[in-house]
Image (cartoon, grey):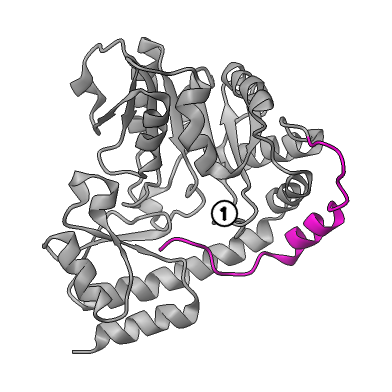
Amino acid sequence: MGTPVDPVPPVIRQALADASDAPGYPLTAGTPALRDAIAAWVARACGAGVDGLGVLPTIGSKELVAWLPTLLGLGPGDVVVVPSICYPTYEDGARLAGATTVRTDSLTALGPDPRVRLVWVNSPGNPTGRVLPANHLRKVVDWARERGAVVASDECYLPLGWSAAAEPVSVLAPEVCGGSYDGLLAVHSLSKRSNLAGYRAGLVAGDPALVAELLKVRKHAGMIVPAPVQAAMIAALGDQEHADAQRERYRARRERLLAAFTGAGFTVEHSEAGLYLWLTRGEDCWATVDWLARRGILVAAGVFYGPGGARHVRVALTESDEHVAAVAARLARP
């Protein structure tokens, strides 16, 4: 269903243990070493420049997604734009702030609505695995800047591109942002890259003025990453070897599940990146959920992610090799 099952890499666990004697309050902004590590990783992974880049550690990525509209001061009368099929927490965050959510994949349909304050993009997408090309993201950025809206890009699956024809690109990349981070925030997580879902380790990078505002509120709200987790994040961000090994595990599982589901008559749509297969049998998603459950296979109903997912299900790659093999065997049975 999406929860990592592989071990936390030893280099990260050791860093956490070494920093466990932490009697004082940690810095909400992160230690200087962590801020440097985040900036260096964002430069490598997103193609961003370090100069003029604001960075901030977060208590996982979901926390930031849920509270971002509130942290940005949105409220009743403001509009948050989310993809038509998307992670439910985007809409939850708007509700927490009292703002209104609009689901759309076409910003031009909104016209010059001055109420739009925040636009969420998610590439590679959850649940679809869809990758938005750089020219599409650039149009979103230009549209939002013309209206003074913030673009928040959920890029938690950015390192997991499976198709060379659809390589994921960050909103912080020069071909998207034009070399300026104004009005942009990129959200990342170490939950899948480094199996740190249990550590609650995430980060946000982008417009330094926006990051400074987030920091100001988060200080008073107690949204602080624990000191040992900050040390673990430094180790995780600085070690690419474990991330490459984990990516290879997911690639192998994806290939096996892709073959198994297509062999069982499913159609795979998008899914060119990320940790999920977006599947359909051309029927109501609950009928598909039931069909699979009768074979001992649990998946997420597509309608969880919006009305547009009513005929799809989401299959996660985050299961052990043994469970993936069992799924393939069960699907092969008549």
Confirm whether the magenta stretch covers residue 308: no
Q: Nearer the viewer, residue 48 or 220?
A: 220
Q: Residue at x 40, y 17 (%)?
A: 149
**Whole-percent x, y for residue 45 in the image:** 58, 43
Q: Residue at x 69, y 26 (%)?
A: 219
Magenta span of residues: 1-26
Quadrant of the image occupied by residue 85: top left
Q: Residue at x 40, y 18 (%)?
A: 75
**Whole-percent x, y for residue 174 in the image:** 51, 28
- 29 lies above or below 22: above
Look at mark 1 in the image and give the residue it sits on. Answer: 191
- 309 lies above or below 325: above
Quadrant of the image occupied by residue 283: bottom left
Figure quadrant of the C terminus: bottom left
Q: Residue at x 36, y 30 (%)?
A: 95
Q: Is residue 174 something one can see in this rendering?
A: no
Quadrant of the image occupied by residue 280: bottom left
Q: Is residue 276 something one can see in this rendering?
A: yes
- 69 lies above or below 11: above
